Image (spheres, grey):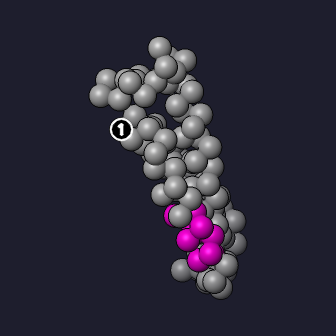
Amino acid sequence: MTQFLDQYHLLGPAIGLATFLIIGFFHPVVIKTEYHFGTRPWWIFLLVGIAAVASSVIIADVFWSSILGVFGFSSFWTIKELFEQRERVIKGWFPKNPRRSAQYPD
């Protein structure tokens, strides 16, 4: 697949599209994770990010290495966004989970 993309000079647009989709994937993940679990699972995103970045260093193929790098650093960014999402919930910009309302200051 990478040979086809490289031969027709589509590698850059394919990586760009994949980056767009990965970022779009993480946006609702942040919202849903904070709603259901709060900020407690931040360490899962850390481990996934470390594994993805380590894999991107090991893999020689430019396309897959780039995709794993983007995925890994998007996982790291998700940690930050998870804590910021909590602040947005406290401000009332997003709904609180009624089962976890004790975790939010009044």
Name the image quarter holding the N terminus: bottom right
The answer to whether residue 46 of the structure is visible from this angle is yes
Q: Describe residue 44's horizontal placement relative to residue 98 as left or right.
A: right
How would you classify the magenta stretch by its main secondary structure?
helix
Q: Nearer the viewer, residue 69 or 21?
A: 69
> 53 and 13: which one is in front?
53
- Total numbered labels placed on residues in the image: 1
Q: Is residue 17 visible?
A: no
Q: Is residue 72 magenta?
A: no
Q: Quadrant of residue 95?
A: top left
The amino acid sitting under disc 1 is His
Q: Position of residue 100 (x, y in %)?
A: 35, 29
Q: Position of residue 84 (x, y in %)?
A: 59, 34
Q: Is residue 40 above or below residue 16?
A: above
| Residue at image point 57% right, 48% down | 78
Indicate the position of residue 47 as horizontal and vertical percent values.
53, 64
**Quadrant in the picture for residue 7:** bottom right
On screen, 80 above or below 18?
A: above
Secondary structure at badge 1 equals helix
Q: Residue at x 63, y 70 (%)?
A: 53
Q: From the viewer's perspective, tell me whether residue 28 is left or right of residue 22.
A: left
Residue at (62, 75) in percent of width and height:
54
Residue range highlighted in magenta: 48-56
Q: Residues within 10 Å of mark 1 (few under 14, many from 20)?
A: few
Residue occupying image coordinates x 38% and y 24%: 102
x, y (%) of residue 37? 39, 41
Residue assigned mark 1? 36
